[in-house]
Amino acid sequence: MKTDKKSEITTLLSGIGLNIFAIFIGIIIALFVASNTSSNMPASSNHGAIFPFFNAILFGIITLIAFFSFKNIFKNYSWIITLIGILIMIFASTKV
């Protein structure tokens, strides 16, 4: 009985729709973090305050590509790619 429940949770976590939704939520959170970070940049930095936004979007796209590339290799653990990508995305959007 426990294996059935574990299998259901693993199937849910490895679903394509849930992972794509989580990546887009991660992008929104990273953009929010970037907006708070970019306000701390000095005015003399000119266009440098936009880099955290680019990092959030760029790493979001990289996470999507990595998820679609490796989802068949890591069938039951593809959610780990999503989680690592979201963490890297948020970390990259904090500071340049």
Image: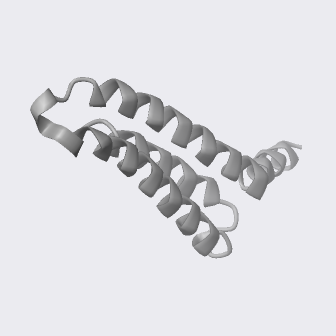
**34 versus 76 height, above or below:** above
Expressed as whole percent of the image width and height from the top left, the position of residue 29 reads: 51, 33
> In the visual, does 94 lie left or right of 4?
left
| Residue closest to the eye, 73 or 85 | 85
**75 versus 8 height, above or below:** below
> In the visual, does 92 lie left or right of 16?
left
Residue beneath the point at 31% across and 42% down: 50
Residue beneath the point at 69% across and 61% down: 76
Quadrant for the C terminus, please: top left
**77 versus 74 height, above or below:** above
The answer to whether residue 15 of the structure is visible from this angle is no
Colour scheme employed for the rendering of this structure: one colour
The number of numbered badges drawn on the structure is 0
Residue beneath the point at 63% across and 69% down: 68
> In the visual, does 45 lie left or right of 75?
left
**22 versus 40 height, above or below:** below
Quadrant for the N terminus, please: top right
Residue 69, by quadrant, is bottom right
The answer to whether residue 19 of the structure is visible from this angle is yes
> In the visual, does 54 lie left or right of 72?
left
| Residue closest to the eye, 77 or 71 | 71
Residue beneath the point at 43% across and 57% down: 58
Residue ranking furthest to the left: 44
Expressed as whole percent of the image width and height from the top left, the position of residue 51 reads: 29, 46
Expressed as whole percent of the image width and height from the top left, the position of residue 27 reads: 53, 42
